Amino acid sequence: MKLPELRCLREVELSEILKSIKKILSRGGVEETVVVGSDGSTIVANYSVFKALEWLGVSYVPVSRGSSEKTYVPLEALGFFDSLESSKHRVFRDTEELLYRNWPTPLVRLKNSSLCGRTVWAKLEGYNPWSASIKDRIGWYMFKRLTEKLGSPPELVYEATSTNTGLALAALCSIHSSRFRAYLPSTAAAGEALFRIFGAEVVVSSKPLTVDLISDVRSAADVDGAVNPNQFENDANFEVHLKYTAKELEIQMREAGIVPKAILGGLGTSGHMSAIALYFKSRFNGVKIYGVVPKPGESIRGIRRIETGMKWVHYVELDGVVDVSLEEAARSAIEIARRDGILVGISSGAVYCAYRTMVDVGQLDEGDYVLIFPDSGFKYVDTLVRYLNKATE
Ligand code: PLP
């Protein structure tokens, strides 16, 4: 049956959904039917299989009545790749399509930043339209899910953000005539003007982006009747990367003719790297996944240390976590600009720095490597210039 015609009224534990996703991805297909009730569209058994298929973004679901049947339907036959609907000639009916019909974001070989037999491929998430970052994906998906739940776009939205998710939500709120209030941590106060340009309200907190600030925003939303998408706990954050980001990457890898030895990326909420870890570890044998975080006591916008609290990373397997300082990250972003002519953000610099450090210590064999670059560098010029002299020393 077509997926949109099916309804699942039961909540399913995240761990159960992820277990089913893992099984489906590792077998390359689904091995059992979902059971529907007498009305033909309500799921009555195999809830986690249904949820897994929904999160994986298939178009069709194998169903049966009465009891579940053993069957094998490959993912391709279920329309697994249908969710990627790019506009071939780049014509868009509105600025919302500019996001999801413009995917995949580019995967580019960094010819001059590749090191001794290890080829670097960068996925450039700065090519997303609103915040010029990977966070447009989750802003869009959280907003879409809320709109489906409420029956219409939310009127008032509050979110704690280190800038990028907030900018994505600010843009979506403009598109849908909703009001938006961004709660910025002390470390991101410089982004205030950008929000005001989008017509959003801004509250600059004296707190850093920790559970404390996140719970303040939740309480403020409750008091004011606002919705709080809450990127830190909202599973739409994980789901959107599974359904789109990871899947895009697989298609791009096929076109490039590579199976990477490893994929490296930064951890903030842990949404994108956790989804990528689950997807690639289930679907490809031997692909290693590394997370990148700031060194203790250091602050790099967008990424955080795991112990500051993140959700999905605890449900998946990473092969390692690499610590990078702000200075190393900034210098690496400058190095990429000078070698390959592309200005990437500081957390992208951190990801490149982690790759280079691992090459230096002999941890990475020859082969292809994919680095996820979450945003472009134009927002960070003030920080980058502070490291210009050091980068040329
Ligand atoms: N890099 C930047 C610039 C970000 O804005 C973020 C998230 O806000 C990340 C990395 C981390 O991404 P995630 O939240 O998916 O872990």
Image (cartoon, grey):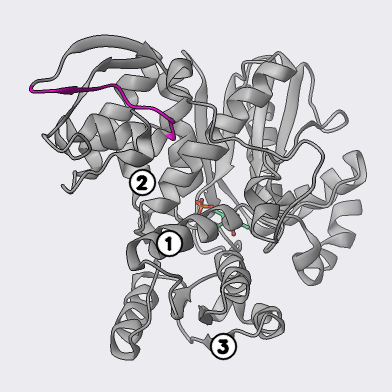
Which mark sits nearer the N-terminus, 3 or 1? 3
Packing grade of label 2 (10 A; few <14, some 14-19, many >=20) is many
The answer to whether the residue bearing label 1 lies less than 8 angstroms from the nearest atom of ligand 1 is: yes
The structure residue drawn at horizontal position 44% and vertical position 31%, both measured from the top left corner, is 59
Is residue 83 placed above or below 337 in the rendered structure? Answer: above
Question: Which residue is the site of mark 1?
Answer: 231
Packing grade of label 3 (10 A; few <14, some 14-19, many >=20) is some
Looking at the image, residue 351 sits to the left or right of residue 155; the answer is: right
The structure residue drawn at horizontal position 15% and vertical position 47%, both measured from the top left corner, is 10
Q: Residue 201 got which mark?
A: 3
Q: Can residue 46 be found in the magenta stretch?
A: no
Looking at the image, residue 10 sits to the left or right of residue 230; the answer is: left
Is residue 279 visible in the rendered image? The answer is yes
Ligand 1: quadrant of the figure: bottom right
SS assignment at label 3:
strand
Q: Amino acid at mark 3?
A: Glu
- Badges 2 and 3: C-beta atoms under 8 Å apart? no
Question: Which residue is the site of mark 2?
Answer: 312
Q: Amino acid at mark 1?
A: Gln
Q: Position of residue 155 (x, y in %)?
A: 45, 80
Q: Residue 242 got which mark?
A: none
Is residue 232 visible in the rendered image? The answer is no
Q: Amino acid at mark 2?
A: Trp
Q: Position of residue 104 (x, y in %)?
A: 68, 38
Q: Position of residue 81 (x, y in %)?
A: 54, 27
Which segment is the magenta one?
A: 57-66
